[in-house]
Image (tube, grey):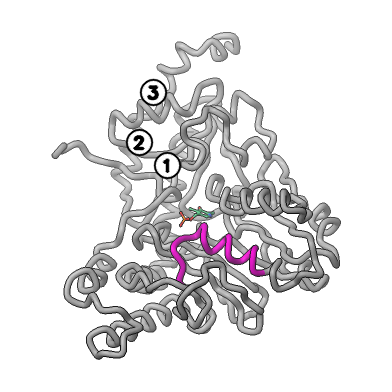
């Protein structure tokens, strides 16, 4: 085992499983392996734990337990919401999304477009804020569903979801939000009734990978995405991923307890990192809407150099961050989000996202603040763009 430290500032890609979550899960991976649908006591007793997890998650969201369906991931929840809305509203043939959605929405919309549905994509300004005039123009009586993320995974921008939901409802359309990045960081109360569908994912919330949930407001018709057995009251077939569901329930309870901390302690660490970088490194820019942003995220462009090179040098110190989104790693194209914001080429290529969690410390922030400026200076020394700027 390597003794090198890891400084993990990539929590929008995935998070560490909380120790309490791991502990809550282990009985269901060892002794309590029964099938919750079984008639015998050994299996049947497991269902109480699935129900308990549903209650804990409902409490975090301000929802009713019966409004939650456990799924395999955030991506499945996104797929299920869009497909259900179209299936249950056959007289409507249009979807309205935004250009900065996650691929879990973008690529479903693209597939539906190829099948003949009409898709409108709301553009954003240079700070990643939605063009609400366009939104008004796009949302009409042909629209089956409006789907806009609560918070953006790359910039942390928080979107005007309530306003969009009201626009959708004015035209009799449904409203879905991909809240994978917002749950646990932004307080929510779904009992207010303005959200029809909401997607979330365990592994962005200190639960394991491979579990998620879809909120479907009571009274909204739902057509299942995964068909088969009668699990999840017929809304999502497949034997329950009990251990992970229990883990998600515990993660939700921890998130409820820590949401204040996210907005004070984690925010303070993010701000210390961000202002420290801006103060010591010339020619940086903060990407996104700093007034409406997740407390844990900063996206910073280091102009005239490549984000990938910065990441490789940070990696030598065990520092984990991200350029673009993990989903586009492998290509050197700047992320679709930064491109949609119209960032100049020289800034989009040098963008780095740091995303923190409650497990990060001030000492880690200071470690990055010590290591990063010389890395940037070194890369700029060998950058032809930089020298032509000087
Ligand atoms: C991570 C993420 C997803 C996908 O969730 P998975 O559980 O990994 O499928 C969807 N939307 C956003 C905004 C995300 O950050």
In which quadrant of the rendered view does residue 215 lie? bottom right
x, y percentage for residue 76?
A: 51, 61
Residue appearing at x 36%, y 79% in the figure: 50
Whether residue 59 is visible, yes or no, is no
Residue appearing at x 78%, y 60% in the figure: 94
Residue 20 magenta-drawn?
Answer: no
Image check: 140 left or right of 350?
right
Q: Secondary structure at mark 3?
A: helix
Dots 1 and 2: beta carbons under 8 Å? yes
- Residue beneath label 3, please? 375
Q: Secondary structure at mark 2?
A: helix
Whether residue 115 is visible, yes or no, is yes
Q: Residue 273 got which mark?
A: 1
Distance between mark 3 and mark 1 Cα atoms: 16 Å
Q: Is residue 310 above or below residue 381?
A: below
x, y percentage for residue 334?
A: 57, 32
Q: How many marks?
A: 3
Image check: 344 left or right of 316?
right
x, y percentage for residue 340?
A: 68, 39
Q: Secondary structure at mark 1?
A: helix
Label 1 neighbour load within 10 Å: few <14, some 14-19, many 20+: many
């Amino acid at each position: 085992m390597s003794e090198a430290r890891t400084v993990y500032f990539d929590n929008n890609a995935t998070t560490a499983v909380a120790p309490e979550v791991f502990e809550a899960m282990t009985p269901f991976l060892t002794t309590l392996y029964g099938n919750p649908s079984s008639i015998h006591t050994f299996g049947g007793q497991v269902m109480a734990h699935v129900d308990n997890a549903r209650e804990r998650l409902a409490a975090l969201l301000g929802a009713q337990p019966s409004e939650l369906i456990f799924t395999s991931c955030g991506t499945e929840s996104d797929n299920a919401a869009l497909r259900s809305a179209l299936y249950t509203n056959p007289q409507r043939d249009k979807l309205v999304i935004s250009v900065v959605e996650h691929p879990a929405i973008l690529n479903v919309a693209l597939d539906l477009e190829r099948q003949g549905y009409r898709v409108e994509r709301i553009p954003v300004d240079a700070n990643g804020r939605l063009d609400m005039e366009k939104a008004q123009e796009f949302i009409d009586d042909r629209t089956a569903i409006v789907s806009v993320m609560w918070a953006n995974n790359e910039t942390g921008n928080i979107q005007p979801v309530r306003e969009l939901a009201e626009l959708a409802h004015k035209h009799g359309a449904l409203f879905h939000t991909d809240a994978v990045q917002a749950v646990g960081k932004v307080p929510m109360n779904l009992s207010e009734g303005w959200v029809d569908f909401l997607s979330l994912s365990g592994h962005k919330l200190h639960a394991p990978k491979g579990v998620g949930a879809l909120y479907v407001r009571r009274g909204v018709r739902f057509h299942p995405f995964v068909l088969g057995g009668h699990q999840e009251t017929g809304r999502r077939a497949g034997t329950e991923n009990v251990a992970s569901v229990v883990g998600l329930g515990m993660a939700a309870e921890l998130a409820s307890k820590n949401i204040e901390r996210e907005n004070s302690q984690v925010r303070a660490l993010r701000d210390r990192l961000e202002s420290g970088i801006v103060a010591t490194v010339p020619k940086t820019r903060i990407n996104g809407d700093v007034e409406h942003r997740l407390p844990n995220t900063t996206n910073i462009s280091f102009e005239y150099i490549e984000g990938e090179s910065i990441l490789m040098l940070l990696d030598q110190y065990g520092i984990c961050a991200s350029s673009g989104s993990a989903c586009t790693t492998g290509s050197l194209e700047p992320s679709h989000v930064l491109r949609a914001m119209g960032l100049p080429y020289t800034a989009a290529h040098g963008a780095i996202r740091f995303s923190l969690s409650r497990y990060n410390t001030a000492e880690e922030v200071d470690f990055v603040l010590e290591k990063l400026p010389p890395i940037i200076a070194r890369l700029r020394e060998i950058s032809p763009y930089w020298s032509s700027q000087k």
